[in-house]
Structure formats: structure tokens, C-alpha cells
Image (cartoon, grey):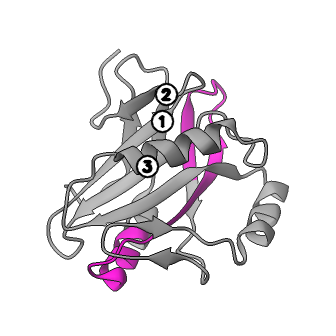
């Protein structure tokens, strides 16, 4: 993975996109380094472009203090999240999805990940019918990969790719 640039991801049909700055990637990779061989994760926030087809990520949360984790599982807690999201809402920044780390294995979406994202997509509490899931896998100190997915309204999972497909 090129670790020195912003990334833009798109679905093959260019219906869904995501832009993430290097500083946010670094923030997540640093959290993965600290977590070692345990999963970790947090929330993705930002806004959509004027065409409503590309999510511009503006911040990511780290793992809340009440999160639980193990080698192959992660349950994101909620401590401090609502007040943080309320502050962001005032700046027109919104919940866009989740991110988490698969330590020393692939960044591919798992059946558990799909179940979680379907729940988020259909929950009235999240107000996010097409959540993004960003997964970091591998060794955060050396050789890591990042994959992004969107759960569309029909609950299909679409991988977003970089470099972005040509129009």
C-alpha cells in the first residue's frame, strides 16, 4: 500500500465513492499498531459531495473505552460517541459507517461484518441506509491493506476500489 497519499475509492459502476485523507489513514494505522494482535475500530464521519455519490471522510473515531475485543472479534463501544457525533452534526458532518482492523490477516469482509452492516443500514437509530465499512488488514507496522465496502439499500455489498475505475 502506498502510505503517502490520499485515497479515492469507487464502485465499478461509479455509483458509490469514498475519499480519505492520509492523516485519517495514519490515525487508524496508529490505532492498529497499538492494538497489536487484537481487533480495534471506530466510526467514520464526514459528508457527501454535491452529487451525493462520494463520501468525503473528515474524521475517524478511535475505539471507545467500553469497546470489547479479541484476536478475531471486535464490539465497538459507545462511550463518548453520541456527544462527539452531536458536535460534528452542528458542522454538517455525519456518521458514514465503521472501520476496524483484522490483525495479520486479510482485509476482506467477513460474514459477521456483513451482518453488522445490514443492521446499521436498516436501523432508524443510525440514519445511514448505505453505510461504509473500511477494513484494515495485515501488519500495521509493515505490510497492511485497506478495503472499503458499501452496503447499499438492497443489502448488497459492493467493494469500493482504488485506484478508482475509469469512467
Question: Disc 2 designates what residue?
Answer: 16
Quarter residue 39 falls in:
bottom left
Q: Residues within 10 Å of mark 1 (few under 14, many from 20)?
A: many
Question: Disc 1 designates what residue?
Answer: 150
Question: Disc 3 designates what residue?
Answer: 113
Q: Which residues are magenta?
A: 28-57
**Which residue is located at x 43 percent, y 31 percent?**
157
Quarter residue 81 falls in:
bottom right
Q: Residues within 10 Å of mark 2 (few under 14, many from 20)?
A: many
In screen coordinates, is 72 left or right of 144?
right
Which of the numbered marks, if any, corresponds to residue 22? none
Whichever of callouts 3 and 1 sits on the residue coming sooner in the sequence is: 3
Q: Residues within 10 Å of mark 3 (few under 14, many from 20)?
A: some
Q: Residue 35: where, in percent of width, then height?
A: 35, 81
In the rendered image, which quarter contains the C terminus?
top left
* Residue farthest left in this picture: 143
In this picture, is 136 found above or below 56?
A: below
Q: Check contact, mark 2 vs mark 1: CB within 8 A.
A: yes
Amino acid at each position: 500500500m502506498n502510505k503517502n497519499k490520499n485515497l479515492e475509492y469507487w464502485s465499478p459502476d461509479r455509483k458509490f465513492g469514498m475519499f480519505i485523507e492520509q492523516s485519517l489513514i495514519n490515525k487508524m494505522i496508529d490505532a492498529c499498531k497499538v492494538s497489536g494482535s487484537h481487533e480495534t475500530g471506530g466510526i467514520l464521519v464526514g459528508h457527501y459531495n454535491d452529487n451525493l455519490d462520494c463520501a468525503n471522510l473528515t474524521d475517524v473515531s478511535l475505539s471507545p473505552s467500553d469497546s470489547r475485543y479479541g484476536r478475531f472479534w471486535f464490539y465497538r463501544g459507545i462511550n463518548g460517541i453520541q456527544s462527539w457525533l452531536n458536535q460534528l452534526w452542528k458542522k454538517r458532518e455525519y456518521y458514514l459507517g465503521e472501520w476496524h482492523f483484522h490483525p495479520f490477516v486479510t482485509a476482506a469482509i467477513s460474514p459477521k461484518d456483513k451482518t453488522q452492516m445490514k443492521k446499521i443500514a436498516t436501523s432508524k437509530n443510525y440514519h445511514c441506509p448505505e453505510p461504509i465499512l473500511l477494513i484494515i488488514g495485515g501488519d500495521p507496522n509493515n505490510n497492511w491493506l485497506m478495503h472499503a465496502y458499501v452496503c447499499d439499500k438492497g443489502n448488497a455489498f459492493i467493494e469500493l476500489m482504488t485506484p478508482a475505475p475509469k469512467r
